[in-house]
Image (spheres, helix red, strand yellow):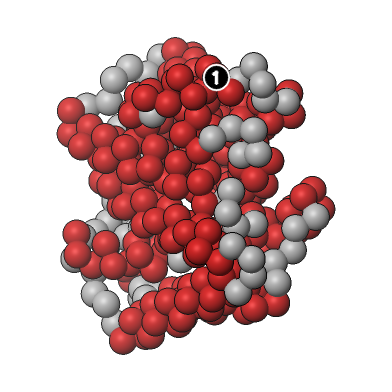
Amino acid sequence: MTFRSSPIPPGVLTAGAVTFTVFAWASAFVSIRSAGAAYSPGALALGRLLAASLVLGLLLLIRRQGLPPREAWRGILVSGVVWFCGYTIALNWGERLVDAGTASLLVNTGPILMALLAARLLGEALPPRLLAGMAVSFVGAVVVGLSMSSGSGGSTSLLGVVLCLLAAVAYATGVIAQKPALSYGTPLQITAYSCMTGAAVCLPFTGQLLDELPRAPASATLNMVYLGVVPTALAFTTWTYALARMPAGRLGATTYAVPAIVVLLSWALLAEVPGWLTLLGGLLCLAGVAVSRYATRSPRTAHTPATPVDGTPPAPAKGNRT
């Protein structure tokens, strides 16, 4: 997207995009928990992605943006299959088995996974304190798993933890794939075609969606549409807008606020508060992520190039994250 004559400084636009994304994604955990009571994981994913694809398709027409260049399609396809489809289904399924706050804590181990992928695919270093942070977060994930399995239906709860961790892996993989694609296409193009790819992969769940739609309460259907319009169509676009303008790792750090917001929202709207041991494990997850991010901060001389005045995103620097 081009913002040639915008009176708002690019830094303010980026900060606003990040803030909107964090709050929208936090609200998604609560909406998934609500809509998931009436829709199965695959049907909910398909309905969400179809609603998002419709909105994003209209935005493409309004902005008169066509197909992205051929060089962007590899990242679009990987992001669409792994992130938009795989992440969404895994998270929908996981939130049927664990509460929204716990799910958000587990998914937000994603930045550490991104660091590993960036080291393997983008040539980033893995300093000792980054490895220490990953170890702390792993211990936190184990504590969360043990706390969830200590109640009734332990194996089911453990499955929920595993699904949320798989969602974190899909999240990290999708972001690493998406970053290079932004060198060739606009944030709207990358988001829209990734979403449409994810929707196409979810089409086998059409029968489930058509079967469950007439029986679902209106509130669940509205939550599904909300998930498609706000946390997906709009928030993924603002995310890619910010991702094109700042290092992926630094941007990833902003999502550490998501679990706290989710816990507050789930307490207010769903009357769900994780137990103390679950919270302790979640805090260990976030503490490990914080340690790893503190250790990988770059010198000031290694900043990503500033965005030009016309708003065109700079080429992404090697060794970055979401």
Q: Is residue 303 left or right of residue 46?
A: left
> Residue at image x 64%, y 57%?
99
Determine the secondary structure under disc 1.
helix
Count of marks, rendered view: 1
Q: Is residue 128 left or right of residue 251?
A: left
Seen from the viewer's position, the closer of residues 71 and 7 is 71
Seen from the viewer's position, the closer of residues 219 and 16 is 219
> Residue 308 at x, y = what percent?
38, 43
Mark 1 packing: few (<14 Cα in 10 Å), some, or many (20+)? few
- In this view, the residue farthest toward the front is 153
Seen from the viewer's position, the closer of residues 111 and 85 is 85
Establish if 147 lies above or below 21: below
> Residue at image x 29%, y 82%?
127
> Residue at image x 27%, y 56%?
317
Establish if 106 lies above or below 234: below
The residue under label 1 is: 211
Residue 93 visible in rendering: yes
Q: Quadrant of residue 207?
A: top left
Establish if 231 lies above or below 53: below
Q: Amino acid at mark 1?
A: Asp
> Residue 315 at x, y = what percent?
27, 47
> Residue at image x 70%, y 72%?
275
